[in-house]
Image: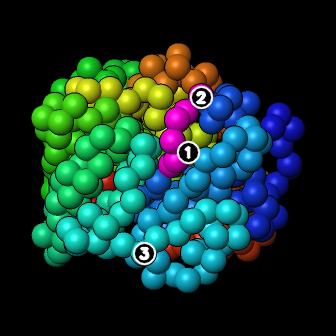
Amino acid sequence: MNAYPEKIADVAMLEELLAVPNAELISMMTRLPGDIMILGVAGKMGVTMAMLAANAIKAANVKKRVIGVARFSNAEEREKLEKAGVETVVCNLLDREQVNSLEKVENIIFMAGRKFGTGGSEEQTWAMNVLAPALVCEHFKESRIVAFSTGCVYPLEKLESCGSTEETVPSPVGEYSQSCLGRERVFQYYSKMNGTKVLLFRLNYSIDLRYGVLHDIALNIRDGKPVDNSVGFFNCIWQGDANSNALRSLELCESPCAILNVTGPETASVAAAAKKMGELMGKEVTFKGEPGEIGYLNNSGKMCRLFGYPQVSLDQMVIWQALWLADGNISIGKPTHFEVNNGKF
């Protein structure tokens, strides 16, 4: 899809846009053997990923199932998936018996994890981020697995570093980031032990308009609050591009694990993005905090070589985000905490 709308009017339009497959994804569906199961499908990204996969399969005119697995506390999300042609299965991924009851399929996207509210319930975070992957790896040892991770496993970087690459040695700050490295180590262990083909999908800052770094900045502007500029720079990528790259990464799974940084190629400025969105929203922009020298900055050069430049540019995301909140559209109430550089999410 080359021509984008000036603005995205509502949730239905947003989710439809996020689920439009590109030619490369459609082509992959003609080559990829087996069905696709998305574990943790009811999270922030999973619903539109499942819809994207189903649309790509339909466009490719091949027979392939998409199966979405989650606890489905929100019945509306399950209904939306089934309407889109996605099969749904209720499962608690921390319950070994329930995991072992899942149908074994060739392609797994592992999206389950916990971030928000880590403080005060660290044991739940570690269980979800480390124990659940172990149960999944034991059951799906013969599958390809794209395992969602985060750029927060890397050390904090200075702006001039050009960001962490896949070769950068992890150095997580704080319990959340440590548990995410624990998740990666579990996948790496089982990949070596069982020969399971895995790709660690190190994503940072997906943009959906209902949440994300740009959303957090624009929300403060809309509400007349100062924008926190303590971490002055960030990376981000349109959720549709991130989801497409995750599905295409099924062809890149290896044993031992492959690793891929997934984010936008630009290093975005908090101040520049805020000023642009302020202009679009007709709002005055104020800041708090002194810009620090370090933050989570990742280098997506490998991703761009493999998949090309993201279809949606940073400038387009900034425009859509400002107009989304200016028009009174919804937020899902899950801040990214992008301004955190001490690991305490």
Residue 199 higher or lower than 341, as above or below: above
N-terminal-most mark, 1 or 3: 3
Given this view, does label 1 or label 3 mark the residue nearer the observer? 3
Q: Secondary structure at mark 3?
A: strand
Left or right: 37 in relation to 273: left
Tag 2 residue:
31
Residue 288 is situated, as x and y percent measured from the top left of the image, at 43, 57
Segment colored magenta? 31-36
Disc assigned to residue 112: none
Disc assigned to residue 90: 3
Calculate the distance from the C-alpha at mark 1 to the C-alpha at mark 3. Answer: 22 Å
Given this view, does label 2 or label 1 mark the residue nearer the observer? 2
Q: Secondary structure at mark 2?
A: helix
Tag 1 residue:
243
Q: Secondary structure at mark 1?
A: helix
Residue 321 is situated, as x and y percent measured from the top left of the image, at 68, 55
Q: Is residue 34 magenta?
A: yes
Left or right: 178 in relation to 142: left
